[in-house]
Image (spheres, coloured by chain):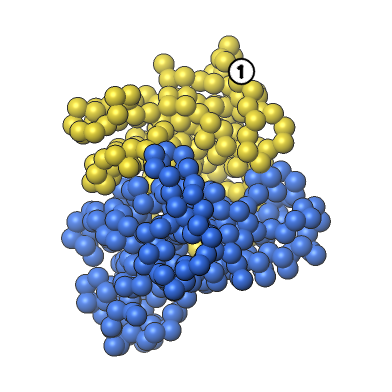
Chain colours: A blue, B yellow
């Protein structure tokens, strides 16, 4: 159930116009093909956050939204490699960097395939946003689907390393994911950076859920699960007390299949 | 005790050439004044990470270092707002964004004043690197000085908000800082992002130290403290067990004056 935008093909990484500029402003900015060339001269290219959006979306938020910050409903996904600190004490930095590259690339492909953006990368972790700037009514479901793809891709990619890298622990490397949906504040939050991000209680709760997810687990908040019942029905319900959050949180636990 | 580079003035934010390109390649790239104009046409401008370096340093690491990743000695600083998750549950997102902006701007000024770069911003937190790409032999001391400035500036800025923002807790808002020095892996760690970062055990330990710092505290590792004895002598020694790190860590505790 995607937003109808007839000139934008459904398949990711192949849109000829920026899907963010289209969804936010109904403005067709060419990002692929010959029409994209004159834009490139002015520095407007595909964004690193998602190859279906352009650098206007990434670096000119105040222009796109006519204000520095807006409140919007979004689904926030955090993922990171479990036990990475422990691992980073045991194996060489050069090998660590291969693991980080594999993780970041696998996650990005999964997130882009479901119209999310890789908003922040922090070493062995990342934060993704769904429903901005590419609008998807089913953003909660899209994030869960991306998380399942992340678990599948990372399991394959990281375990492929086990044979190559001496010193890896016997247990397999694994990834933890946390997802939460709600109102976030999206915009530019420092006077010297032009790239946008999301902040607020919803973002923090998603991060806290991720921190509690074991290797291979996806912890989904009740709010996200309620918007994607077909993906979460019948899954384990886990009550959690999270740092800085007063109320107990009822998380759904999805395990990689 | 800065690296001698006679044409680069000592004062931050006023160098006419990129200090990163100079320190890494002995290449004078104009970033201010009329000579900078032709470079701007090709998209080479001042970096958001530090206004004394250019976008070549930020986005063309493989060109600067002739490889995708290098091992280098650096000091890593993490800072974040204590109790932010709790706060984000209590006050409006619009007010939160003012706090985040004040924090990010205050920290950046302090980090730049001591030749560090703001490598990552993550909502109410950030990661800074000292000694790359701007070389400073006294990078451990520079990071500690920046942390002391962060504490001073954030205390002033955040407490100035207390009168303005209803719902702030009675206790003052505060910032925690963690600092560690050692070999890190610096470079590009995903095939789709061109901005560089640092990874490795040293980075993770700095992050863990920050997570243990109370509001107003700067936790400095023994390795960093050993390189800046005049700044750390006589301070509290706190043994810490940190998640994912087997050995007990002996941290020095600096309190904002």
Task: Please tell me in which quadrant of the rendered image residue A102 appears.
Answer: bottom right
Relative to B118, B180 lies left or right: right
Q: Residue at 43% across / 49% down in the picture? A: A249
List x then y, in percent, for residue B166: 20, 33
Please state which of residues A208 and A34 is positioned toward the viewer in this rendering: A208
List x then y, in percent, for residue A247: 39, 42
Please state which of residues B208 and B58 is positioned toward the viewer in this rendering: B208
Above or below, comparing residue B242 to residue A232 in the picture: above
Please count the marks in the image.
1
Quadrant position of the N terminus of chain A in the picture: bottom left
> In the image as oriented, which residue stretches furthest toward the top?
B234
Above or below, comparing residue A256 to residue B16 in the picture: below
> Circle 1 sits in a helix, a strand or a loop, which is it?
strand
Q: Is residue A105 visible?
A: no
The residue tagged 1 is B237
List x then y, in percent, for residue A223: 37, 59
Relative to B32, A25 lies left or right: left
List x then y, in percent, for residue A196: 33, 56
> In the image as oriented, which residue stretches furthest toward the front?
A234
Few, some or many C-alpha atoms within 10 Å of disc 1 (few <14, some 14-19, many ≥20)? Answer: some
Relative to B163, B42 lies left or right: right
Q: Residue at 29% across / 24% down in the picture? A: B170
Please state which of residues A212 and A132 is positioned toward the viewer in this rendering: A212
Quadrant position of the C terminus of chain A in the picture: bottom right
Task: Please tell me in which quadrant of the rendered image residue B85 appears.
Answer: top left
Above or below, comparing residue B253 to residue B52 in the picture: above
Q: Residue at 60% across / 49% down in the picture? A: B199
Task: Please tell me in which quadrant of the rendered image residue A165 appears.
Answer: bottom right
Relative to A30, A116 lies left or right: right
């Amino acid at each position: 159930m995607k937003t109808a935008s007839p000139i934008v093909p459904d398949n990711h990484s192949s849109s000829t116009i920026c899907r963010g500029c289209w969804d936010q402003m109904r403005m067709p900015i060419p990002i692929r093909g010959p029409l994209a060339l004159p834009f490139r001269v002015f520095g407007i290219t595909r964004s690193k956050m998602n190859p279906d959006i352009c650098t206007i979306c990434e670096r000119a938020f105040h222009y796109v939204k006519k204000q520095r910050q807006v409140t919007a409903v979004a689904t926030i996904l955090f993922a990171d490699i479990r036990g990475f600190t422990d691992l980073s004490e045991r194996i060489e930095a050069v090998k660590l960097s291969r693991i980080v590259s594999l993780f970041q690339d696998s996650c990005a492909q999964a997130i882009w395939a479901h119209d999310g953006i890789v908003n922040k990368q922090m070493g062995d972790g990342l934060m993704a946003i769904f429903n901005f700037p590419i609008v998807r009514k089913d953003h909660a479901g899209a994030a869960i689907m991306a998380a399942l793809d992340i678990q599948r891709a990372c399991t394959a990619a990281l375990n492929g390393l086990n044979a190559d890298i001496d010193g890896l622990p016997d247990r397999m490397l694994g990834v933890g994911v946390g997802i939460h949906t709600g109102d976030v504040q999206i915009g530019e939050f420092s006077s010297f950076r032009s790239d946008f991000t999301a902040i607020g209680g919803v973002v923090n709760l998603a991060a806290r859920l991720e921190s509690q997810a074991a290797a291979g687990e996806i912890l989904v908040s009740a709010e996200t699960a309620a918007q994607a019942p077909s993906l979460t029905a019948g899954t384990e319900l886990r009550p959690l007390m999270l740092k800085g959050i007063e109320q107990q949180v009822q998380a759904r636990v999805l395990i990689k299949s």
